[in-house]
Image (tube, helix red, strand yellow):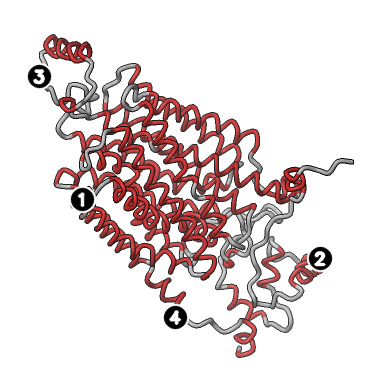
């Protein structure tokens, strides 16, 4: 009997649970890659919507004469510099108009995110995500169809951006909740650091796809990503599994703390004991293990201890209730990390939407080369996200890891803006370095930190809180994502250096907002154990 090939033996070494977990990690990675793939084209196409046509190397004489004749027939002034630009972005205030496109999308995204997590908790993740991806694909393609149908109305493009921003809010809370259901806290920073590279991979693929058509037919730069997102929506509907229990897999439990309220020894036995022998004051048996008196704990002491937890009861048997917005805000660390992400995302999204334009205007690259070079920022983002995850897993200090990277990002941005163009190699190195330091904290907060807070011990196992916590953190961050590109559009006419000063100030504020959490991680001693406190009472 012939021996099995090495590849088959390797595949056979995985358990059924491991196969499902790997599949879900890859699937959610691809789903959110598609979301970000559809967001990137607008930053690439900006340089085609407004071009200095007198400097264009490939000007078709027929097209030039056609525009000249139309201008004379309509009685409009004709400019050799802007004849090939796309109306209404051919005006002198084109930067403000392009900034309005960014702001309309991101403002709608920020507002919608606060509601998306709350809605997503109450609906099927698979259906909610499918609806969002199909809708996003439709409106992304509609933006590109404006090219083929020669639509020159600013209201049309802003309307498309607003609706697209709203439907794209379905993505992040859904995929983070799904991954949180499948993976416990062990090595969460590393796993989610690698997984979160979907953001940068999507940006890279979106840049390459948009860059392929930007100089010839920029409408296809939106139509193709729109079709890809819609196709992935169909894949989501057919294959997404929301929870391990849906396929009879063993759910990953959060790593147990060394000491708990009643001690973790015999935890399962106590849960079973309470479930079978005591009356149900709480709907979740795990809550009873934490909160009901045992081993001589008085009801008075127990009442004092319950004040440290966010208790959410449900009328539906053992199913946990969805957590409220204000209850989620009371989870320790949610407010600090949310506000920090506001400034971190302000910096990241300014690069996302304006880096190709900066490279084209300041460094004098053509539209395609500027788009290709901008992908190096996302390459750095992949490196920074994985590095932040590994370091935070090893040190167990999420806030400190974010703080150090934010502290290094500001001087790196200054060097990038101050040195000017020193050659292609220097530009490549600076883009990768800035991407790592800017996107590292952003990636860590939106993934591992959000998942940690969404499964915080104060929630006592209520997994339905994860979507709301994720939406609050990312929604607050999205306010910064909306403000960054808008401010860049308003400030850039005064000089690109001023834009970088704004980004450095934002990084400084992000760092300052984490000071309290950093000091707690580095200097505050471990509190007394719960058993000791109970004895003192």
Label 1 to label 3, Cα distance in Å? 36 Å
Q: Secondary structure at mark 1?
A: loop
Residue at point 64%, 56% (across, down) = 320
Q: Is residue 315 left or right of residue 414?
A: right
Within 10 Å of disc 2 (Cα), the crowding (few <14, some 14-19, many 20+) is: few
Label 3 to label 2, Cα distance in Å? 85 Å
Position of residue 175 measured from the top left corner of the image (x, y, whole percent):
55, 46
Q: Which residue is mark 2?
A: 276
Which numbered disc covers residue 420? Answer: 1
Q: Secondary structure at mark 4?
A: helix
Q: Earlier in the sequence, mark 1 or mark 4?
A: 1
Which numbered disc covers residue 77? Answer: 3
Image quadrant of residue 458? bottom right
Image quadrant of residue 102? top left
Q: Is residue 370 left or right of residue 380?
A: left
Q: Is residue 25 visible?
A: yes
Disc 3 + disc 4, Cβ < 8 Å: no
Within 10 Å of disc 4 (Cα), the crowding (few <14, some 14-19, many 20+) is: few
Question: How many numbered tags mark residues here?
Answer: 4
Residue at point 62%, 87% (across, down) = 532
Q: Earlier in the sequence, mark 2 or mark 1?
A: 2
Q: Is residue 87 visible?
A: no
Disc 1 + disc 3, Cβ < 8 Å: no
Q: Earlier in the sequence, mark 3 or mark 2?
A: 3
Residue at point 50%, 50% (across, down) = 196
For this orientation, the residue located farthest to the right is 1
Q: Which residue is mark 4?
A: 523
Disc 2 + disc 4, Cβ < 8 Å: no
Q: Which label sits in the foreground, 1 or 4?
A: 1
């Amino acid at each position: 009997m012939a021996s099995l090939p090495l590849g088959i033996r390797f595949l056979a070494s995985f358990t059924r649970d491991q196969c499902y977990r790997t599949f879900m990690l890859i699937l959610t990675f691809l789903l959110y890659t598609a979301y970000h793939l559809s967001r990137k084209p607008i930053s690439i196409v900006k340089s085609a919507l407004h071009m200095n046509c007198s400097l264009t190397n490939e000007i078709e004489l027929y097209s030039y004469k056609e525009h000249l004749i139309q201008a004379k027939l309509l009685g409009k002034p004709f400019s050799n510099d802007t004849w090939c630009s796309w109306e209404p972005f051919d005006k002198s205030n084109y930067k403000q108009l392009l900034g309005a496109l960014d702001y309309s999308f991101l403002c709608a995204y920020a507002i919608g995110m606060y509601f998306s997590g709350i809605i997503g908790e109450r609906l099927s993740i698979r259906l909610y995500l499918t609806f969002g991806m199909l809708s996003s694909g439709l409106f992304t393609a509609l933006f590109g169809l404006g090219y083929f149908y020669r639509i020159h109305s600013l209201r049309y493009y802003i309307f498309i951006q607003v609706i697209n921003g709203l439907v794209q809010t379905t993505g992040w809370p859904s995929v983070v909740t799904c991954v949180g259901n499948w993976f416990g806290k062990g090595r969460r920073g590393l796993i989610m650091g690698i997984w979160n590279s979907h953001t940068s991979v999507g940006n890279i693929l979106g840049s390459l796809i948009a860059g392929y058509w930007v100089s010839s037919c920029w409408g296809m730069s939106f139509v193709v990503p729109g079709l890809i997102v819609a196709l992935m929506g169909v894949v989501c509907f057919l294959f997404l599994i929301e929870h391990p229990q849906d396929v009879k897999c063993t759910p990953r439990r959060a790593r147990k703390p060394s000491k708990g309220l009643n001690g973790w020894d015999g935890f399962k036995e106590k849960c079973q004991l309470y479930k079978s022998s005591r009356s149900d004051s709480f709907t979740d048996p795990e809550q009873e293990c934490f909160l009901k008196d045992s081993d001589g704990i008085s009801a008075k002491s127990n009442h004092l201890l319950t004040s440290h937890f966010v208790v959410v009861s449900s009328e539906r048997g053992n199913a946990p209730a969805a957590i409220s917005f204000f209850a989620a805000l009371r989870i320790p660390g949610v407010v600090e990390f949310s506000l920090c992400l506001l400034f971190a995302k302000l910096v990241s999204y300014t690069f996302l939407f304006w880096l190709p334009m900066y490279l084209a205007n300041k460094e004098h690259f053509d539209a395609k080369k500027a788009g290709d070079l901008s992908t190096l920022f996302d390459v750095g983002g992949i490196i920074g996200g994985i590095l932040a995850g590994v370091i935070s897993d090893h040190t167990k200090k999420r806030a400190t890891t974010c703080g150090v990277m934010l502290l290094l990002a500001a001087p790196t941005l200054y060097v990038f803006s101050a040195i000017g163009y020193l050659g292609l190699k220097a530009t490549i190195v600076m883009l990768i370095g800035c991407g790592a330091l800017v996107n590292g904290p952003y990636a860590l907060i939106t993934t591992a930190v959000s998942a940690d807070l969404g499964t915080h011990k104060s929630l006592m196992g209520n997994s339905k809180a994860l979507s709301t916590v994720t939406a609050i953190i990312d929604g607050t961050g999205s306010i910064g994502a909306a403000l960054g590109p808008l401010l860049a559009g308003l400030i850039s006419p005064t000089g690109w250096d001023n834009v970088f000063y704004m980004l450095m100030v934002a990084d400084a504020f992000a760092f300052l907002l984490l000071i309290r959490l950093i000091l707690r991680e580095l200097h505050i001693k471990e509190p007394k154990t719960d058993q000791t406190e109970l004895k003192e009472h």
